[in-house]
Image (spheres, rainbow, N blue to C red):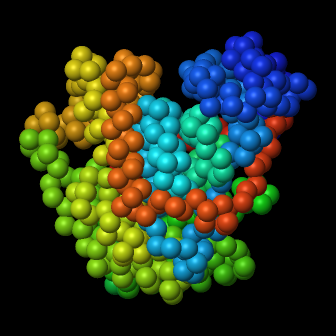
Amino acid sequence: MTLDPRPMSTVPASVVQVLGAAATIAKHQLTVHDEAALASPMMDALVRLAVFGDTTEQDWARWAIWEAGRAVGVYSASIHAFYMARGRGEVPPVTVPAMNIRGRSYDTMRAIFRTAKKMDGGAFIMEIARSEIAYTEQRPSEYVAVALAAAMREGHRGPVFLQGDHFQVNHKKYKVDPVAEVSAVKQLAAEGVSAGFYNIDLDTSTLVDLAFPTLDEQQRLNYEIGVDLTRYVRGLEPTGVTVSLGGEIGEVGTENSTVAELEAFMDGYHRTLAAQAPGMIGLSKISVQSGTSHGGVVLADGSIAEVALDFKTLENLSRVASKKYGLSGAVQHGASTLPDDAFDHFPKTETAEIHLATGFQNMLYDHLPTALREEMYAWLVKHAADERKAGDTDDQFFYKTRKKGFGPFKRKLWDLPADVAQKLNDAYEAKFTFLFEKLAVGGTAAAVRRYVPGPAIARSAPGTGGPAVEAAPDDPDAGE
């Protein structure tokens, strides 16, 4: 990490005007005068500058959101201590939803915080994968600002859990240049932690090599590179923060994981970490494969094939992860397109966390005005044609590629007509209510407050010497 080379800047008039009497900036310090205004349309205007303003406006608006949150007790935090308590059996069984928000992020996150407030829920994560950062055009600093703004807009107080999902080592790139590929993941981790991602899923499962005869050999690169990335992230942590780190033993969409594979990975990981960095804190959770795939399998008519999720395998893996290795449990990816009757099984099987993305994307597309949807599909035909496989129907092509429309149409998605936006917001809130109920998220706020007290970290104003990290290069899809 290097110091920001830009000269000290002055606060843009647009930011000062939006803040009005609610907050003032003097000598590069922000003071909140009207806490209630943070839950008003003032925040809507401030977050728009953070997303759509020019570079200077973005920098100052994002800093103002962070510092306003710090002033009233809204802050990005690590869920590590809560997860360790869960692994020890000190909190009731809850499956934490980790939700990938690809489009209309501010309004969608507002619906999440409304639901959490209504249900007294605190154990939930908003995340974005390495691939999604690229195609949705949401760098970590923007994603953090939008989440904190949404939290304050809905009157939330306390920690906000933001996660870098699938910070993945790409197998093909690793084979060509392993040092460069691992360095790219480290660079992204540095950007993420600097922005406020204090939860990161390190995905080196792509390096598992089933050609070797023993499980330890098959998992060796997975756990060795996993330890390398663990040590790097631990070196990035702000004072008082232990980043929650996840590992992964089987790439999502492949064969179901086994207890023996989990043990081979964890034993190798612990052995390597102890040898290289004695006493260093390791993982808080482990991602496994139990029958899902990212986004589901789309059929010719655009419908999703039924998923045969192996809950017994998931239960066995989760219990071994917690009882033998002290983790919170197993993590299930690719869950958002499962049938509704599947979700209440996750807490019963002691699943620590599930990842949800495509289902929210589908809801958004289902609510779009026809003209906008057709415009987005026309863009995909022109710009994503190389992703169309021989034999794909139009429904299959659009379903698999339409996530790529979020970046180019970002502003239009933020600016949906009021009636369309209201229907979509209502649908999201109903969906989040359902998920929080089935996953036992309701009533978890007290336990979160108990184990995650802070700290709220102060940030230097733009141009005053704070850390600056270059963006990592784009990566092929790794998210759901």
| Rendering quarter of residue 437 | bottom left
Q: Nearer the viewer, residue 126 or 472?
A: 126
What residue lies at 72% left-to-right and 13% top-to-bottom?
17
What residue lies at 47% left-to-right and 32% top-to-bottom?
107
Q: Nearer the viewer, residue 277 or 407?
A: 407
Does 433 sit left or right of 38 as displayed? left
| Residue 66 visible somewhere in the drawing | yes
Horizontal and vertical percent position of residue 321: 47, 80
What residue lies at 68% left-to-right and 27% top-to-bottom?
37
Q: Relative to 116, does residue 144 appear above or below in the rendering?
A: above
Horizontal and vertical percent position of residue 351: 41, 71
Does 433 sit left or right of 157 as displayed? left
Q: Relative to 474, does residue 352 appear above or below in the rendering?
A: below
Q: Nearer the viewer, residue 361 or 439?
A: 439
Does 421 sit left or right of 62 as displayed? left
| Residue 261 visible somewhere in the drawing | no
Horizontal and vertical percent position of residue 264: 45, 83
Horizontal and vertical percent position of residue 72: 74, 41
What residue lies at 22% left-to-right and 20% top-to-bottom?
370
| Rendering quarter of residue 9 | top right
